[in-house]
């Protein structure tokens, strides 16, 4: 693994940063206040590849590697958390599974609509009673009836649901077959029986809509299955592995933004006759933030590199998301601390960034679940080395 970005990766970073500095960052507070994404900016995103980060070129995509994708998401998050969450979900959860498992007909039907900048993709896994325990908890059922599936159930906390031309939905297609009893179905939101509910009222990431979906005898064609029937759970786990790299990158972008604001404030604000940046208490918080952001970014890039080189990256993706989201929590908290009372005010961005960051230790695998994923892999690796140690 190379510790320097390639020329191409650096170019991606430059182009995305320039775009975000002018199109997103100045409007981030407004997006938070109004609860609306800035569609004017999203419609321009195809020009810089942001709506099709890992979509093949034949579908108008940027076909980026995973490190470049992480860089792009980090840069968006550095500018606007809400936009970053919607774009992370769009690219990784909306486009990703269709690119990976879709038939040519499914790709032809949906990718052009998804990459054009007028829609955002969505994946529906979670349910009111199933978040961490998807295998045990998912109740949404799809029952075969001739040439169709009849879908019943509900999905919760679905990012971009109201903007998606198609919602890739995890359903139970068989009760008997354990984790082989799940399939992903590509469901168009206009299908009779599908209702997309009003956005949830959230603590942060307010511009990124999070919605409940209900299915009442919604009929979808039999060929709406993504990939192979029965592969839905495995596809979910693989999509989450990849999504965890993205959420790690998003966490770093938020931490980086808060850290930059903290340095700016600490070098301007004066107390006891000098800049507060001249006090050791402040210097230590900033030094720790610099170190932790660097460490988390390195881990996110390593997980991305493992993915790009075709190696197993489940453990590293879980570690990267866990570390990045937990350091983001600390960095954002300390950025407020450095700002004092001003940090608690909506006039300074650190208040919003802190609220936005709070989701990162929850979505796409809570910190607790990620520790389970890591421990399982650590134990497997240990057991594999036992014969050699005996
Ligand atoms: N890639 C591919 N397949 C995987 C996988 C991965 N990363 N992880 C598990 N699987 C497969 C296993 O191989 C197993 O297949 P079989 O049933 O054919 O043997 C199946 O999935 C179930 O595996 P297992 O029972 O071992 O599950 P785990 O203990 O590995 O996973 C947890 C359990 C709780 C860790 C897992 O369900 C999980 O990650 N849950 C969190 C889900 C989540 O992030 N929810 C947020 C919703 S989206 S915002």
Image (cartoon, helix red, strand yellow):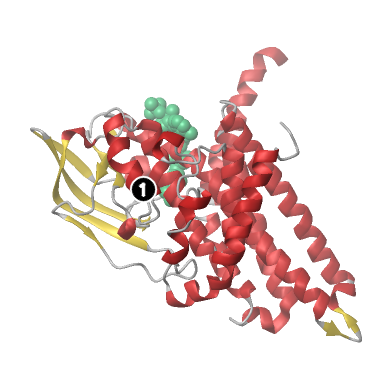
Q: Is 89 placed above or below 315 here?
A: below
Q: Is 121 placed above or below 39 here?
A: above
In this view, the residue in front, 365 or 197, is 197
353 left or right of 85 in image: right
Query: x%, y% of residue 343?
Result: 67, 78
Q: Is ligand 1 less than 8 Å from the beta carbon at label 1?
A: no
| Quarter-of-image position of residue 352 | bottom right
Q: Which residue is mark 1?
A: 114
Query: x%, y% of residue 182?
Result: 29, 35
In this view, the residue in front, 44 or 25, is 44
Task: Using the rendered image of the protein, determine whether residue 103 is visible from the camera's viewpoint.
Answer: no
Q: Quadrant of the N terminus?
A: top right
- Ligand 1, seen in the image, is in the quarter at top left
The residue positioned 63% from the left and 59% from the top of the image is 18
In this view, the residue in front, 37 or 358, is 37
Task: Say how many tags the image has.
Answer: 1
The residue positioned 54% from the left and 63% from the top of the image is 81
Q: Secondary structure at mark 1?
A: helix
Q: Is 108 placed above or below 79 here?
A: above
């Amino acid at each position: 693994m190379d510790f320097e970005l390639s020329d191409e990766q650096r170019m991606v970073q430059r182009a995305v940063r320039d775009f975000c500095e002018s199109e997103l960052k100045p409007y981030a507070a407004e997006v938070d206040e109004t609860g609306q994404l800035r569609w004017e900016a999203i419609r321009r995103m195809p020009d810089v590849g942001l709506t099709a980060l890992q979509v093949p070129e034949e579908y108008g995509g940027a076909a980026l590697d995973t490190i470049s994708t992480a860089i792009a998401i980090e840069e968006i998050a550095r500018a606007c958390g809400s936009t970053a969450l919607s774009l992370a979900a769009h690219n990784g959860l909306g486009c990703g599974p269709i690119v990976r498992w879709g038939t040519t007909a499914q790709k032809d039907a949906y990718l052009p609509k998804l990459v054009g900048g007028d829609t955002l993709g969505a994946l529906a896994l979670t349910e009111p009673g199933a978040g961490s325990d998807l295998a045990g908890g998912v109740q949404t059922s799809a029952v075969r009836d001739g040439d169709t599936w009849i879908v019943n159930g509900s999905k919760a906390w679905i990012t971009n649901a109201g903007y998606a031309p198609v919602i890739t939905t995890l359903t139970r297609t068989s009760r008997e077959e354990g984790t082989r009893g799940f399939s992903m179905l590509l469901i168009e939101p206009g299908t009779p029986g599908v209702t997309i509910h009003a956005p949830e009222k959230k603590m942060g990431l307010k511009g990124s809509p999070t919605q409940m979906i209900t299915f009442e005898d919604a009929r979808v064609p039999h060929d709406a299955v993504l990939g192979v029937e029965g592969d839905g759970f495995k596809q979910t786990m693989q999509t989450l592995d990849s999504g965890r790299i993205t959420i790690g990158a998003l966490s770093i972008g938020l931490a980086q933004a808060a850290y930059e604001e903290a340095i700016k404030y600490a070098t301007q604000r004066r107390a006891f006759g000098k800049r507060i940046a001249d006090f050791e208490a402040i210097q230590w918080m900033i030094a720790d933030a610099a170190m932790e952001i660097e460490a988390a970014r390195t881990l996110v890039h390593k997980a991305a590199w493992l993915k790009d080189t075709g190696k197993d990256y489940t453990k590293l993706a879980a570690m990267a998301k866990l570390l990045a989201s937990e350091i983001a929590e600390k960095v954002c908290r300390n950025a407020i601390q450095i700002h004092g009372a001003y940090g608690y005010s909506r006039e300074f961005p650190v208040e919003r960034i802190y609220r936005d960051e709070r989701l990162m230790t929850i979505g796409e695998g809570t910190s607790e679940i990620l520790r389970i994923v890591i421990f399982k892999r650590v134990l497997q690796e240990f057991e594999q080395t036992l014969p050699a140690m005996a």
